[in-house]
Amino acid sequence: MNTHWEILVVDDEEIARESVAAWLREDGYTLETVPSGRDAIEKARNKDYAIYFVDLKMPGGPDGIETMMEIRKIHPEASVIIITAYATVDTAIMAMKEGAQEYIVKPSSPAEISLLVNRIIKVKNLQRENIILRKKLSKQYSFHDIISKNPRMVKIFELIKEIASLRSTVLIQGESGTGKELIARAIHFSGDRAGKPFVSVSCAALAETLLESELFGHEKGSFTGATSQNRGKFEMANYGTIFLDEIGDISPKLQMDLLRVLQERKFYRVGGTEELQVDVRVIAATHRDLHLAVQEGRFRDDLFYRLDVINIAIPPLRDRREDIPLLARSFVERLSHELKKNVTDIAEDALKILINGDWPGNVRELENAIERAMVTARGSILTGEDFEFLSHSRNGNNGWKVPTNLTLEEMEKQAIIAMLKKTDGNIKEAASNLGIDRSTLYDRIKKFDIQR
């Protein structure tokens, strides 16, 4: 039986459409019939049928070709069979050119229709099996929400398993958007601290005094606005893990305070006199070159060596392009639920566009691109047309001339100001459009003293 495959028959003649439906019901298929192209298009908006039988000539509304074109806008991979009593070479060529899978002439024999449907359904079954296999492969290449089959990433997964239960400090290095926090979470939840707190802090998002209070807490009255005692992130992470993102951005004073915590596992709250002791594993991350920062005197060498006990360098997405199809389909599966969009897959032409992209924002930028395509997609499968915005964004500066009266820093500042205005101060959207991490954008806003 083929009850899981549904077929729609569209014909203004009741006898014709019910005859086709009756033949196919005998073969075990589930059938629906409608008398017009308008009804068929409305049905297609709510459901994707395995096969659409569409009559070519239907008066009083869209004809078969127009109906097929509208259906294929909704479902780009739809299998449409045009049926007609007025067969000509021209109409056959037009139907096939516009996307019809087959073209048959009335009156058709039941055997001919059964063979045709059986052949299409076999292809559909193979496509469904491929989707199931892809999902299995995705799970096979998944490690704590990180998806990769790249050899360098697989070695990182193996290293995570080895170090997960150690107390040693880990330094994760990689470009913005490569998934440094995902790696940190994988370390925490793979080890014996998995049942304890995992606390994340973005060191670039806060000014020095606020970050000090965020990390170590403060006592009541220690500064203006400190109306009560406040526990810091190190206290909250006791017996667990603290993740210090963008560690390369902290001030010299905080570098010294953090060094003491790493050495002695002790600290004072801001304005406090009681020394607190914690058992916390520290995982730090940065997109900066800390070796260079040490050489230039911007980062303490003793703190660097304390942090760099175990080093994990995440490769950028452009160096692991084989992961892009896996990641893209994973994002489609998750976002289809979050966005409540009936999008199930990505076509090959779309995957080629994604694989050939540079992705300076790495995995995060890829995810944002998938989400944008899904929001505007009209079909159940993302096609190359859904990603046209990528070529516009990559080629959109062809008519733009580089200002010769500005320094590189001033150009960067003006670009950030313009993007913040465009997004009405939305940091997440502005960072995504600029192709940088939110913490990096906070860092630039602070550096350039930009008013939001």
Image (cartoon, helix red, strand yellow):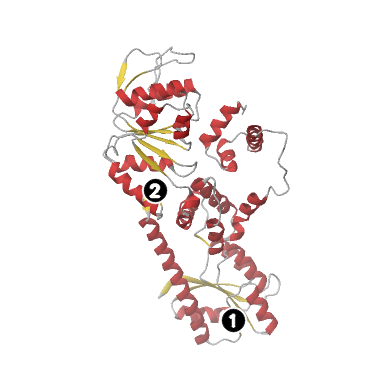
Quadrant where the image shows the C terminus: top right
Res. 278 image quadrant: top left
Q: CA distance from mark 1 to mark 2?
A: 52 Å
Image: 336 above or below 249: below
Q: Quadrant of residue 107?
A: bottom right
Question: Which residue was labeled with disc 2?
Answer: 145
- Tell me which residue sits at (59%, 62%) in the image: 74
Q: Residues within 10 Å of mark 2 (few under 14, many from 20)?
A: few
Residue 46 position, x and y percent, is 55, 61
Query: Within 10 Å of the Cα at label 1, are there few (<14), some (14-19), or many (20+) other Cα atoms?
Result: some
Q: Amino acid at mark 1?
A: Ala
Vertical relation: 452 (above or below) 43: above
Classify mark 1: helix, strand or loop. helix
- Where is residue 47? Give x, y as percent: 53, 63
Image coordinates for residue 279, horizontal then vertical, percent: 28, 28
Q: Up-down: is 79 above or below 112? A: above
Closer-to-camera residue (139/82): 139
Residue at horizontal 70 percent and vertical 74 percent from the top: 59
- Is residue 84 at all visible to an observer of this figure? yes
Q: Which residue is mark 1?
A: 16
Residue type marked 2: Asp
> Which type of secondary structure does the marked residue at label 2 adopt?
loop
In the picture, measured across the screen, residue 115 lies left or right of residue 82, that is: left
Looking at the image, tell me whether mark 1 or mark 2 is earlier in sequence order.
1
* Nearer-the-camera pick, 247 or 120: 247
Q: Residue at x 50, y 80 (%)?
A: 22
